[in-house]
């Protein structure tokens, strides 16, 4: 498992070409979403201080935008037209969203006994990938 976030040129077949853009203060980076128009990325890190951060595409200007009430954010997606961020929290079993600065946060959907493992935004629709969790009595 890597504890860094890297980018590589898309139009190359060389696998050794990449640039680590964020290396410090990461426990378990997992979700990543990019907005190339606004030149920002969003990423989640879970562990002792689970959070969602925003940074420029070169890894500079890091800002924590969500840190309360999240457990394990496994997937992020962006609505680039409206500057909205959406995420799936696997352990809380929620789909949530907020503005790019972390304001206007809201729970869009909570699904008990279903873990959300992926989220994607396209035009006006949010798609979810889920897995059913087992319940023991």
Image: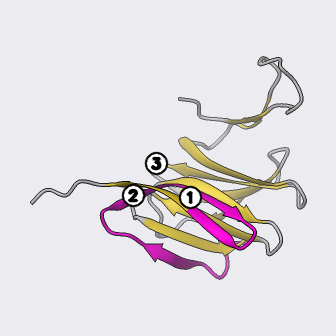
**SS at mark 2 in the image:** strand
Residue assigned mark 3: 47
Disc 3/disc 2 C-alpha distance (Å)? 18 Å
| 15 sits left or right of 133 in the view | right
Q: Quadrant of the C terminus?
A: bottom left
Frontmost of labels 1 and 2 is 2
Task: Point out which mark residue 115 bears.
Answer: 2
**SS at mark 1 in the image:** strand
**SS at mark 3 in the image:** loop
In reply to whether residue 32 is colored magenta, the answer given is no
Majority SS type along the magenta span: strand
Residue drawn at point x = 80 percent, y = 26 percent = 18
Residue assigned mark 1: 51
Disc 1/disc 3 C-alpha distance (Å)? 9 Å
Stretch of the chain drawn in magenta: 101-127
Q: Nearer the viewer, residue 120 or 98?
A: 120
Q: Nearer the viewer, residue 12 or 30?
A: 12
């Amino acid at each position: 498992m890597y504890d860094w976030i890297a980018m590589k040129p898309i139009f190359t077949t060389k696998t050794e070409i990449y640039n680590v853009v964020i290396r410090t203060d990461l426990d378990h980076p997992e979700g990543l979403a990019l907005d190339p128009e606004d030149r920002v990325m969003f990423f989640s890190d879970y562990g002792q201080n689970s959070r969602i951060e925003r940074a420029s595409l070169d890894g500079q200007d890091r800002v924590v935008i969500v840190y309360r009430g999240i457990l394990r954010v496994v997937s992020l997606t962006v609505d680039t037209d409206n500057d909205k961020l959406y995420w799936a929290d696997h352990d809380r079993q929620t789909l949530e969203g907020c503005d790019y600065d972390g304001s206007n946060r809201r729970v869009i959907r909570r699904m008990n006994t279903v873990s959300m493992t992926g989220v994607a935004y396209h035009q006006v629709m949010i798609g979810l990938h889920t897995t059913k969790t087992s319940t023991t009595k």
